[in-house]
Image (spheres, rainbow, N blue to C red):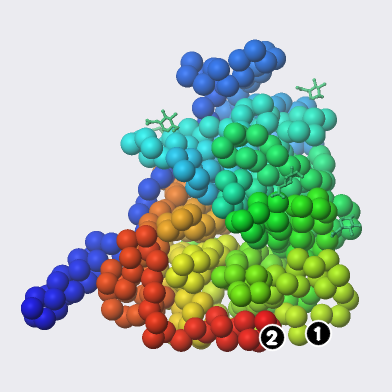
C-alpha cells in the first residue's frame, strides 16, 4: 500500500515536473488589430449612433530605429479612429468570466481603442482582434468629450464584479505630451457594462512628475461593495494616491520608499542596456487580519527592496497624509540584484506573491508565509525569447495571468511585426508554483492543495503573522 502511494507520488511529481510546470503561452499577437465598427459582425455596437469615421492609417511595415513615427505629432488633427499598428503595444491583461481584457495605452498616436477585450470561450487564440470595451463609443478619441476614455495602462477587477482603471488622460506620453484632461479613476460594472464611477484626480493628488499612474489595487470589503479604496501608484511622481469610493474623495501619500533606488537604475533586457527611473510600480494586498486591515506590499521598479504598510494607515486620510510617518512603513528586505519588478499580484489563498521580473524575462514568486529571504524567492517561468518584458501580472481566481510585450525593443530598437511580439500567459497558481520554493511544502502540491488551489499546511510558519506583529496589529 505505502509502496503504491510512493509510486503514485513519484508519478504525479515526475509528470508535473515535465508537463505542468510554469505557464502556458495562451494568446499571441504579431500585431494588434481591432474588430472595427464597420465589420459586419459588430455593426450593432454603434447602431443608431453617429455615422462612423473609419479612416485607418497604415504606415510602412518597419518602425524607424528610434521607434518614432515619422509623422509630426504636434501638427495633426485629432482623428478618432486613426490606426498606426506599430504604435499599438498592449501593456495590461486581466480576466473576468469569459473576457480577457487587454489595454493599449495611447503612448503614441494611432491607437484607435485603449480599453479592450477578447472572448476566452473561443478556440482562436492567435492574432484575435481586440474588441473595444465597454464600446467603440467610449474609446474613440475626443478631447472635448469627458466621458471618453483616453489612455489606460492596466486594470483591476474586484470581487464586486467591477473593472477599475485610471485613465491617464494623456495622448503620446513618449513624445510630446498632449494632456487632454486630469487622470481619472473609472469603475465599470462588469455585469451591465456601465460606467458607475468617474472621478478626476485633484491637482493636490498629483506631483509635477505624475505621468505614470500605471497601476491600481482595489481594497474592498466583500460584504459591502461601497466600502472600497483604490491604491494608485505614481511611479513618476514617487507617491501613492488613495481613492475613497464611499466618500468619492482622494488623497496623496508621500514617503521616501516610493522613490527609485539610484544604485539600481541599470537594466538590461534582450541585450539592450538602459537606465530607468521608475519608482513605486505596484501594490499587492495581503490577507485581511483580525482587525480588518491588510498588509499592503509595494516596491519600486528601479530598486531591490520590498516594502510594506498597513491599510490602516492608507485608508485613514489623517494618518496617511501626516508629514512624519514614524514607523508606519517597513522595509521587508532586499530582493537582490537583477530583481527589477514591474507588477506584483497576490494569490490570497496560498499567500503567494507573483512578480514580473524584467531582467529575468520571467515570472518570480515569493510565498508571503515564508520569511523575506532570497532563498525563499523562486522563478516560476522564464524564456529569453518569448517572455521579454512581463508588463502585467494578475491573479484571477486561482489562475495567474502574465502579459509580455517586448517593450524595450519597441522603445530602443524595433519590433519585427511578422513575428509574435505580444503574449498572454496563463496557468493555475498551483501548477505555477509546483516544485518551486513558493509551494508550501516540498511535497508535490497536488497532495497539499485542493483542486481549487487552496493549500493549507499547518506546520508552516506564518511569517505573515510576524509581519503583522511588526505593525502592532
Ligand atoms: C462566448 O461567451 C459569450 C458571452 O457568454 C457569448 O455571447 C458568445 O457567443 C460565446 N462565444 C462562443 C464561441 O461560445
Ligand atoms: C467631440 O465631442 C463633442 C462634445 O461631445 C462634439 O461636439 C464633437 O462633435 C465631437 N468631435 C468629434 C470629432 O466627434
Ligand atoms: C451603497 O451606496 C449606494 C449609493 O450611494 C446606496 O444606494 C447603497 O444603499 C449603498 N449600499 C450599502 C450596502 O451601503
Ligand atoms: C469626505 O470627503 C470630504 C471632502 O473631501 C471631507 O471633507 C470629509 O471629511 C470626508 N468624510 C469622511 C468620512 O472621510
Ligand atoms: C514580413 O513579411 C512580408 C510579407 O511576407 C515581407 O514582405 C517582409 O519583408 C517581412 N518583413 C520582415 C522584417 O521580415
Whole-percent x and y of residue 206?
A: 84, 58
Q: Residue at x 54, y 74 (%)?
A: 339
Residue 438, located in which quarter of the rendered image?
Answer: bottom left
Q: Which residue is mark 2?
A: 472
**Foreground residue, 442 or 209?**
442
Whole-percent x and y of residue 148?
A: 73, 33
Q: Is residue 81 above or below residue 289?
A: above
Q: Can residue 183 be seen by looking at this rendering?
A: yes
Q: Is residue 111 above or below residue 176?
A: above
Looking at the rendered structure, the secondary structure element under dot 2 is loop
Figure quadrant of the N terminus: bottom left
Whole-percent x and y of residue 204?
A: 89, 58
Whole-percent x and y of residue 81?
A: 65, 26
Figure quadrant of the C terminus: bottom right
**Foreground residue, 412 or 265?**
265
Measure the alpha-carbon separation of dots 2 and 1.
13 Å
Neighbours of disc 2 within 10 Å: few (<14), some (14-19), many (20+): few
Residue 313, located in which quarter of the rendered image?
Answer: bottom right
Looking at the rendered structure, the secondary structure element under dot 1 is loop
Q: Can residue 416 be seen by looking at this rendering?
A: no
In the displayed structure, does residue 74 sit left or right of residue 340? right
In the displayed structure, does residue 174 sit left or right of residue 210? left
Q: Which residue is mark 1?
A: 326
Ligand 4's image quarter is: bottom right
**Foreground residue, 447 or 28?**
447
Q: Residue at x 82, y 80 (%)?
A: 325
Residue 86 numbered tag: none
Q: Residue at x 24, y 66 (%)?
A: 16
Q: Residue at x 55, y 80 (%)?
A: 464
Amino acid at each position: 500500500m505505502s509502496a503504491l502511494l510512493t509510486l503514485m507520488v513519484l508519478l504525479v511529481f515526475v509528470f508535473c515536473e515535465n508537463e505542468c510546470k510554469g505557464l502556458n503561452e495562451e494568446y499571441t499577437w504579431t500585431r494588434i488589430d481591432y474588430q472595427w465598427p464597420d465589420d459586419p459582425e459588430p455593426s450593432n455596437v454603434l447602431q443608431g449612433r453617429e455615422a462612423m469615421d473609419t479612416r485607418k492609417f497604415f504606415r510602412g511595415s518597419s518602425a524607424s530605429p528610434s521607434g518614432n513615427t515619422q509623422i509630426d505629432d504636434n501638427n495633426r488633427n485629432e482623428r478618432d479612429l486613426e490606426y498606426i499598428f506599430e504604435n499599438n503595444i498592449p501593456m495590461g491583461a486581466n480576466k473576468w468570466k469569459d473576457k480577457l481584457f487587454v489595454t493599449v495605452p495611447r503612448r503614441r498616436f494611432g491607437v484607435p481603442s485603449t480599453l479592450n477585450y477578447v472572448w476566452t470561450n473561443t478556440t482562436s487564440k492567435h492574432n484575435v482582434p481586440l474588441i473595444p470595451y465597454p464600446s467603440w463609443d467610449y474609446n474613440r478619441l475626443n478631447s472635448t468629450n469627458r466621458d471618453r476614455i483616453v489612455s489606460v495602462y492596466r486594470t483591476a477587477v474586484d470581487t464586486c464584479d467591477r473593472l477599475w482603471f485610471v485613465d491617464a488622460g494623456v495622448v503620446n506620453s513618449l513624445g510630446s505630451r498632449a494632456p487632454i484632461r486630469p487622470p481619472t479613476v473609472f469603475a465599470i460594472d462588469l455585469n451591465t457594462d456601465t460606467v458607475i464611477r468617474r472621478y478626476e484626480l485633484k491637482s493636490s493628488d498629483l506631483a509635477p512628475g505624475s505621468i505614470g499612474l500605471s497601476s491600481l489595487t482595489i481594497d474592498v470589503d466583500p460584504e459591502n461593495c461601497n466600502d472600497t479604496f483604490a491604491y494608485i501608484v505614481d511611479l513618476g511622481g514617487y507617491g501613492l494616491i488613495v481613492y475613497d469610493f464611499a466618500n468619492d474623495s482622494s488623497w496623496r501619500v508621500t514617503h521616501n520608499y516610493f522613490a527609485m533606488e539610484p544604485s539600481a537604475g541599470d537594466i538590461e533586457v534582450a541585450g539592450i542596456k538602459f537606465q530607468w527611473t521608475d519608482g513605486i510600480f505596484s501594490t499587492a494586498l495581503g490577507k485581511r487580519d483580525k482587525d480588518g486591515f491588510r498588509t499592503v506590499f509595494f516596491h519600486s521598479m528601479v530598486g531591490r527592496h520590498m516594502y510594506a504598510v498597513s491599510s490602516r494607515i492608507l485608508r485613514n486620510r489623517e494618518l496617511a497624509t501626516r508629514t512624519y510617518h514614524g514607523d508606519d512603513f517597513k522595509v521587508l528586505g532586499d530582493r537582490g540584484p537583477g530583481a527589477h519588478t514591474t507588477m506584483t499580484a497576490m494569490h490570497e489563498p496560498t499567500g503567494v506573491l507573483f512578480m514580473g521580473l524584467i531582467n529575468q524575462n520571467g515570472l518570480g514568486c515569493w510565498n508571503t508565509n515564508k520569511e523575506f529571504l532570497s532563498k525563499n524567492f523562486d522563478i516560476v517561468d522564464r524564456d529569453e525569447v518569448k517572455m521579454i518584458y512581463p508588463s502585467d501580472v494578475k491573479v484571477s481566481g486561482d489562475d495567474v495571468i502574465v502579459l509580455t510585450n517586448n517593450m524595450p525593443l519597441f522603445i530602443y530598437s524595433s519590433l519585427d511585426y511578422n513575428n509574435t511580439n505580444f503574449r498572454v500567459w496563463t496557468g493555475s497558481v498551483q501548477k505555477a508554483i509546483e516544485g518551486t520554493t513558493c509551494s508550501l511544502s516540498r511535497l508535490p502540491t497536488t497532495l497539499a492543495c485542493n483542486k481549487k488551489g487552496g493549500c493549507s499546511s499547518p506546520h508552516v510558519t506564518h511569517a505573515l503573522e510576524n509581519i503583522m506583529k511588526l505593525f502592532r496589529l
